[in-house]
Amino acid sequence: VKRAKTGRHVENYQTQAFTLARQQFAMETALRRAIEERQLRLAFQPICDLASGAIVSFEALARWRDSSGVEHQPSDFIPVAEESGLIVPLGRWAMDEAARTLRWWDDACGGHCGMRVAVNLSAIQMQRDDIAPVVEAALIRHDLAGDRFNLELTESAIVSDPDRIAGIMHALKALGTSLAMDDFGTGYSNLAYLQKLPIDILKIDRSFVSGMLADRDKIAIVRAILSLAQALGMRTTAEGVESNELAQTLAALGCTYGQGYLYARPLEAEDALSMIVAARAAATASSAN
Ligand code: C2E
Ligand code: MG
Ligand code: MG
Ligand code: MG
């Protein structure tokens, strides 16, 4: 009886593993086609100055609606893109699309729209692609200065080959871009890299921010990250800012920027443009008074 039970368990496990592999492969095939057929788009979520509430930038987030109308989540397709290497063409597309959108916004505003765009760079892209020339090409193609881009890296990007990654980061900085460490606090624990690498902004992971008002441990972690960033001369962005109270507390603690549903969910590019236009009109009106 015992053996039969174990056997069935193994069989179930194998069936599940095969099913999972098949699903991954199906998604990989569909994603490859989606990239070729331009089914991907970027959503844009505002990042605001916590003290004034002014929008300073937008994070570009990949979105994929497949031909049957199903909207896939980045948490599902980005890992598949990373495992299959499709993150390289996807990442190149995202860089160019972000620059193209910024050019559109600038043109619609009759000049500099006042915003930067943040683009996510996967660790796999840092390993497998020659990323600085890709960024430079997007800037040139859309006639943008390098300081319009903020590139978000995760801690996993710098674990593999720190010296090589440092070289890439300096090449990106030489283009004028700023660099942010995304999801800070969730990854690699060796903090020595922070002082060695040219990082401008630490993005405090949402897992520490959301619910921090009711959790002493989370507040302690957020405070520690903020003082670390201040000591190293870096700015900070809190992810997952969902309430006014949270924004006020974070501002009082000295956090620079906030991103989250309080300000807006990720928006279609034209809705983000409407938000920019409205913010510029409000700023002009208040400076006229
Ligand atoms: P991320 O870079 O940390 O992006 C922030 C994620 O948090 C986004 O999820 C955003 O929609 C979500 N978020 C923002 N504010 C709030 C909030 O107040 N509450 C909650 N619950 N969530 C909030 P999204 O768009 O699903 O993206 C997930 C992740 O996928 C991103 O995390 C990023 O790591 C990755 N990703 C998305 N687009 C790209 C891309 O073009 N390239 C690469 N390499 N990764 C991407
Ligand atoms: Mg990000
Ligand atoms: Mg993040
Ligand atoms: Mg995150």
Image: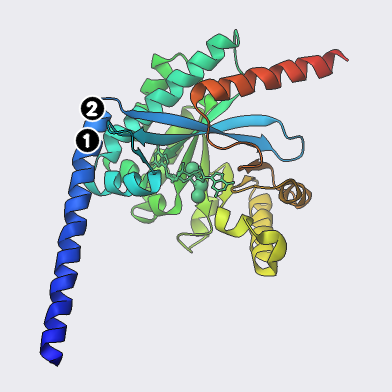
| Residue receiving disc 1 | 32
Q: Is residue 188 above or below residue 285?
A: below
Up/down of 185 relative to 28, above or below: below
Residue 10 position, x and y percent, is 15, 76
Q: Position of residue 125 (x, y in %)?
A: 32, 41
Where's residue 266, x and y in %? Answer: 53, 35
Q: Residue placed farthest to the top in the image?
A: 110
Q: Is residue 127 visible?
A: no
Give the residue at x 39% y 44%. 73
Residue 263: image quadrant is top right
Residue that carries the numbered disc 2 in the rendered image: 36
The answer to whether 288 appears left or right of 104 in the picture is right
Side of 279 relative to 6 (left or right): right
> Callout 2, which amino acid?
Glu
Identity, as a three-letter code, of the amino acid under mark 1? Arg
Q: Which quadrant would residue 26 be assigned to in this image? A: top left
Percent coordinates x, y for residue 59 in the rendering: 52, 35
Q: At 40% across and 24% down in the image, what residue appears?
A: 97
Q: Do the numbered discs 2 and 1 sit on residues whose CB atoms are within 8 Å?
A: yes
As helix, strand or loop, the secondary structure at mark 2 comes to helix
Mark 2 and mark 1: span between their CA atoms? 6 Å
Q: State the residue in front, 168 or 262.
A: 262
- Please give the count of numbered marks on the rendered protein: 2
Q: In which quadrant of the rendered image does the C terminus lie?
A: top right
Colour scheme used in the picture? rainbow
